[in-house]
Image (cartoon, rainbow, N blue to C red):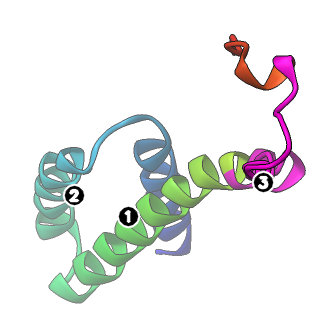
Amino acid sequence: MTILAISSFLLGTVFGRFLNIWVLIPASAVLFAVVFVNFPILEFVVLSACLQVGYASGLALCLIPNLWRRHKKPREPSRTIAPRESAAPASFFKARHH
């Protein structure tokens, strides 16, 4: 049972990393068919929960690098407009290409 729970978790992690949430419906249906034939229904609940938790961890693995890049490279500080009595430098009016 432990090996099935770990493999269900890892399969959910792969699904969460590369596929959308709708893949959980057929995956749960196949899981139910396999477990219903061989094991009690309580084990289906455990394996289904492992699949869903694995899916959530796969999503988290996708989000962590994005958060890390955003933390390492913060946004530019906002520019303040110069007071009216002073003239803005010419470089302020040039378009920036990103």
Coordinates of residue 26 in the picture (x, y in percent): 13, 47
Kindly state the secondary structure of the residue where label 1 is placed.
helix
Q: Does 16 sit left or right of 24 as displayed?
A: right
Q: Which residue is drawn at 69% across and 10% down?
A: 97
Mark found first going from the N terminus, 1 or 3:
1
What is the C-alpha distance between the residues marked 2 and 1?
A: 9 Å
Residue 6 vertical placement versus 39 (above, below): above
Quarter of the image where one finds residue 73:
top right
Q: Nearer the viewer, residue 74 or 17?
A: 74
Judging by the rendered image, the residue that carries numbered circle 2 is 31
Q: Nearer the viewer, residue 72 or 31?
A: 72
Judging by the rendered image, the residue that carries numbered circle 3 is 83
Query: Which region shows up in magenta?
Result: 67-90
What amino acid is at disc 3? Answer: Pro
Main SS class of the magenta portion in the image: loop
What is the C-alpha distance between the residues marked 1 and 3?
A: 59 Å
Q: Residue at x 55, y 65 (%)?
A: 6
